[in-house]
Amino acid sequence: MRKNSMIFISYIDSENATSGSRLRPKEMLKGFKEQGLHVLTLTGDQYAPSRKKDIQKLLTQIKTEKPAFCYIESPTYPIMKHRDRKLIKQLHRQGIKIGYFYRDFYRKFPMRSGRRSISRAMKDKLLDFLQWRTDRVLRYCDIVYFPSEQCKELFSFKDMRSLPPAGENHLPSVPKPVNYTCIYVGGIVGHYDGKLLLDTFEELAKRDNRYKLILVCRKDEWDRLDHPAKQAEWLEVHHTSGDELAALYGRAQIGLVSQRADNQYNKYVIPVKTFEYMSYGLPIVSVNVEALAGFIEQVDIGLVVHASPSDFADGIQKILENDCYSEYCRRISQKLLTQNLWSHRAQSVIRDLGSLEKQNG
């Protein structure tokens, strides 16, 4: 067995990562390579015609070069193809330790309501069945990772752990001057409350006209959102992603998270945008949802508020107007650089799966 070798499996194209769900596999792969590991990769859409051939190539490689462990980044949907589920069993039979990051578990919650077409209902039944088959094959994994500790209450795998949240180092080289500008990046409908954001800045405008909001979202969601403040002077809207966000983050002083507090799924997840904010040194103001609130309060990098415009506005003002902004920035920098880079997350997986190998050795 080659101790400095591993397998990395994902279901997206790591070279074209823009959204949070695509960013994580790309950064984890980079993090493993930064640790000096030789990485055998299997990436790309699970429906891609080439994937079957790629799986066979991987199985041939490990006959002569058995890696120490395998790390798998889950797809958004269940594992759809039998060949991918079979691969997990084959790796297990060969004694390769497997860690699986379980990213999305929407199907644990009855979020599909109202009348549905026959085709939609049949699709949901199929996805539920495939999710059941996916969960069954995960019994062959040595560790199943989740985005937060709260997720463990939903599952019963033999070894369940949470991975430390992670970001990149884009910290500003000099302190930012106070400019009363906040940024929000992400969804504004569904799991997220775009109306609350706009209501909050309407409230702030009544108190102090210096406050500005940079809102970054998908154009189709912006078009669907109905709100009288969409043309407000304090609002700046962008439909962009990836590297183009850097300049916008550079202009902001606070990062906002506006998940719907009444959505059960949100109780268990910490949005990727949280760590993008940390990456750029931004203190965070978030609505009170369990996993995210626990993280923010534990490391003291921002404020958790009730999901009301007045409380959200109070939190933003408290950070910028009470001489505590620089202290929040200092804590974010310290936390990011010592515990929450992607390299730290990769190191955590290496330690976990390496310790299992030693126990069995």
Image: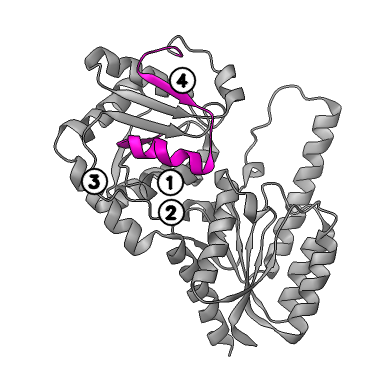
Q: Helix, strand or loop at disc 2?
A: loop
Residue 11 image offset from top left, x and y in percent:
70, 55
| Display coloring | one colour
Q: CA distance from mark 3 to mark 2?
A: 17 Å
Give the label, 2 or 4, closer to the camera: 2
Image quarter of residue 33: bottom right
* Depth check, front residue: 15 or 276: 15
Mark 4 vs mark 1: which is more N-terminal? 4
Tell which circle, 3 or 2, labels the residue nearer the N-terminal end.
2
Q: Are marks 2 and 1 in contact (CB under 8 Å)?
A: yes
Q: Are marks 3 and 1 in contact (CB under 8 Å)?
A: no
Which residue has dot 4 on it?
195
Point 23% across, 48% down: residue: 174
Instruction: Identify residue for label 1.
Output: 276
- Nearer the observer, 216 or 9: 216
Q: Amino acid at mark 1?
A: Glu
- Residue 272 % position (x, y): 48, 46
